[in-house]
């Protein structure tokens, strides 16, 4: 994430239970949703860093429920809490002085703070197969560690978040309303999505096929949401827990495929740069399945080939809908940014279709199951 010189607004730091003095802050630019600051404090003569975030209220109408989910999940992952917060393999929420997980400022904005995990780095595009395998292992381990935690304890903070048919309906509505008059310019992109509605049920149907496929999932498994230890080069901690909710491992794996096997950035305008990296796919799936081991049920195993295609199509659909809706959801840095993002996703879907035989071959070999087509 790039850093922008911008201070944390006054009056926020003091609300949190940090036994030290404020020692400066910067804004972390990146992420399409929340506003984030890297904050330093002098705690007993030692610099300790924190990430402060203002939760996006348009996206999350109930930030309190988001924080309740995160609190429960991070406590579960931290286990008995014997390890110091900055060494844990999960985020640690800093409570407020009154013992809450968030602070509401006079403008009704919700703020939270985490310990910053030191000595780590993230990637927007992976450098090699080792990183692909590690990312798979880390997100697979997340699912495995949450196995003995009932999904019913978590709130669905964004309804139908990865319900692909709903996302396609939302695109249809955006197109009908056409509030910005942009629909006439995106005919090819709309056709691309509507030509592929047959895939919409492919992942959600895993749950109707076998209830055991319903799990606590992360739901935002972009490659840049996993921290790599600088020394060991291992994936050590998954971050951005905003959307931990009941879901499926397939949503998570699909988003990993989108961001680990796509060779270009999410908003790359030169579509020729976006290709599908098969060796990364193989390493990613290998790492993911290894972390989940025998726990996967057949309804999941047979969907690892299609998962990436469906989630990439779904997220492209969301970018396109937001472009039509006037960019109200995903933050943009330039005009047409969401349209660029959508086009890049659709290029990646096409690349997956071209490599489909190879993708299914690898998935059949690693999962031992015939793949849903
Ligand atoms: C958003 O928080 P961030 O920017 O990582 C979005 C994800 C999308 C992603 C696309 C709550 O994630 O669903 O996959 O952008 N998060 C939410 O980059 O909508
Ligand atoms: Mg997020």
Image (cartoon, grey):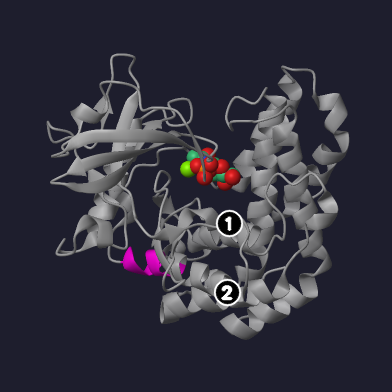
Tag 2 residue? 285
Image point (57%, 74%), residue name: 285
Identify the mark nearer the N-term, 2 or 1. Answer: 1
- Magenta residues span 140-147
Going by the picture, which residue comes out furthest to the front? 45
**Cα–Cα gap, marks 2 and 1:** 12 Å
The numbered mark at residue 352 is none
| Residue 368, image quadrant | bottom right
Q: Which residue is mark 1?
A: 255
**At 78% from the left edge and 56% from the top edge, which residue is drawn?**
274
Q: Is residue 142 magenta?
A: yes
Query: Is residue 166 something that shows in the picture?
Result: yes
Counting from the top left corner in percent of width and height, residue 349 is at 76, 56
- In the figure, is residue 113 to the left or right of 15? right
238 w.r.t. 132: above or below: above
Is 167 situated above or below 262? above
Q: Residue furthest top?
A: 106
Picture residue at 50% right of the left edge, 57% below the top? 122
Q: Quick one: quadrant of the C terminus?
A: bottom right
Please name whichever residue, 203 or 16, is drawn nearer the observer in this view of the structure: 16
Q: Are marks 2 and 1 in contact (CB under 8 Å)?
A: no
Is the shortest distance between ligand 1 and the CB of mark 1 under 8 Å? yes
Which is the main secondary structure of the residues drawn in magenta?
Answer: helix
216 and 84: which is toward the camera: 84
């Amino acid at each position: 994430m790039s850093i922008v010189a911008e201070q944390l607004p006054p009056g926020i730091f003091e609300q949190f239970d940090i036994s030290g003095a404020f020692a400066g802050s910067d804004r972390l630019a990146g992420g399409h949703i929340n506003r984030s600051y890297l904050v330093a404090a002098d705690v007993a003569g030692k610099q300790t860093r924190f990430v402060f975030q203002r939760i996006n209220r348009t996206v999350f109408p109930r930030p309190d429920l988001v924080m309740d989910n995160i609190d429960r999940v991070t406590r579960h992952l931290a286990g008995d809490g014997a390890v110091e917060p900055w060494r844990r393999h999960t985020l640690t929420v800093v409570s407020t002085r009154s013992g809450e997980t968030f602070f509401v400022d006079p403008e009704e904005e919700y703020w939270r703070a985490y310990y910053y995990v030191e000595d780590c780095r993230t990637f927007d595009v992976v450098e090699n197969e080792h990183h692909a395998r590690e990312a798979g292992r880390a997100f697979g381990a997340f699912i495995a560690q949450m196995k003995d935690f009932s999904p019913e304890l978590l709130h669905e903070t964004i309804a139908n978040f990865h319900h692909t048919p709903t996302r396609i309906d939302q695109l249809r509505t955006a197109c009908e309303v056409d509030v910005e008059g942009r629909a006439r310019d995106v005919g090819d992109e709309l056709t691309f999505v509507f030509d592929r509605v047959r895939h919409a049920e492919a992942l959600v149907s895993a749950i109707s096929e076998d209830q055991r496929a319903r799990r606590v999932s992360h739901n935002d498994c972009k490659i840049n949401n996993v921290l790599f230890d600088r020394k060991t080069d291992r994936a050590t901690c998954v971050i951005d827990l905003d959307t931990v909710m009941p879901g499926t491992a397939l949503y998570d794996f699909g988003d990993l495929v989108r961001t680990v096997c796509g060779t270009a950035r999410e908003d790359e305008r030169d579509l020729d740069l976006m290709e599908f990296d098969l060796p990364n796919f193989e390493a990613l799936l290998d790492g993911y399945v290894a972390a989940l081991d025998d726990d996967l049920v057949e309804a999941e195993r047979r969907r690892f080939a299609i998962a990436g295609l469906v989630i990439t199509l779904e997220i492209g659909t969301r970018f396109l809908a937001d472009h039509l809706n006037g960019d109200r959801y995903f933050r943009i840095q330039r005009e047409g940014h969401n349209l660029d993002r959508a086009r890049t996703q659709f290029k990646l879907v096409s690349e997956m279709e071209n490599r489909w035989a190879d993708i299914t071959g690898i998935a059949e070999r690693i999962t031992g199951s015939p793949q849903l087509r």
